[in-house]
Image (cartoon, rainbow, N blue to C red):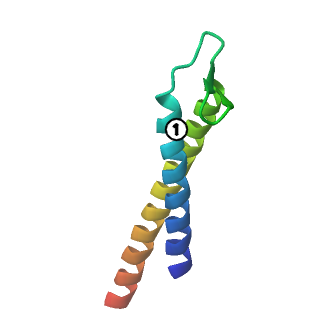
Amino acid sequence: MKCIRHILIIIGIITSLFLWIFIQRANLDYNLEGKFFSTEEGVVYNEQAKMVSGIVVLIGLILIVILVIGIIKRKAVESNLSDK
């Protein structure tokens, strides 16, 4: 049970990181080619990378929901078995 909670925390942290990246990239002013050049960092950001971050966030949220539901069901089964 503790292992699942640790995995849940790790997935939550990774999902939060990709959510932050997604929000940062969503606020950039892309040109018609879908590129943004950061003069401060000297990096070109592609608009398609924003989509990848969004997909990773969506997958992370789905995994978190599945794990939380699994924990809740397991606790319900354990409590029913201990009541008998």
Circle 1 is placed at which residue position? 22
The correct choice, above or below, for 6 with respect to 33 in the image is below
In this rendered view, identify the residue nearer to me: 61 or 49. 49
**Is residue 42 visible in the rendered structure shown here?**
yes
Residue at the far front: name it.
40
Q: Position of residue 58 (x, y in %)?
A: 52, 43
Q: Quadrant of residue 84?
A: bottom left
Callout 1 environment at 10 Å: few (<14), some (14 to 19), or many (20+)?
many
In this rendered view, identify the residue nearer to me: 42 or 71. 42
Q: Position of residue 18 (x, y in %)?
A: 55, 47
Q: Position of residue 20 (x, y in %)?
A: 48, 45
Residue found 51% across the figure and 81% down from its top: 2
Query: For this view, does 16 lie left or right of residue 41?
Result: left
Query: For this view, does 81 lie left or right of residue 44?
Result: left
Residue found 53% across the figure and 42% down from its top: 21
Query: For this view, does 1 lie left or right of residue 51?
Result: left
In this rendered view, identify the residue nearer to me: 31 or 14. 31
| SS state under label 1 | helix
Looking at numbered disc 1 in the image, what kind of residue is underneath it? Answer: Phe
**Is residue 1 visible in the rendered structure shown here?**
no
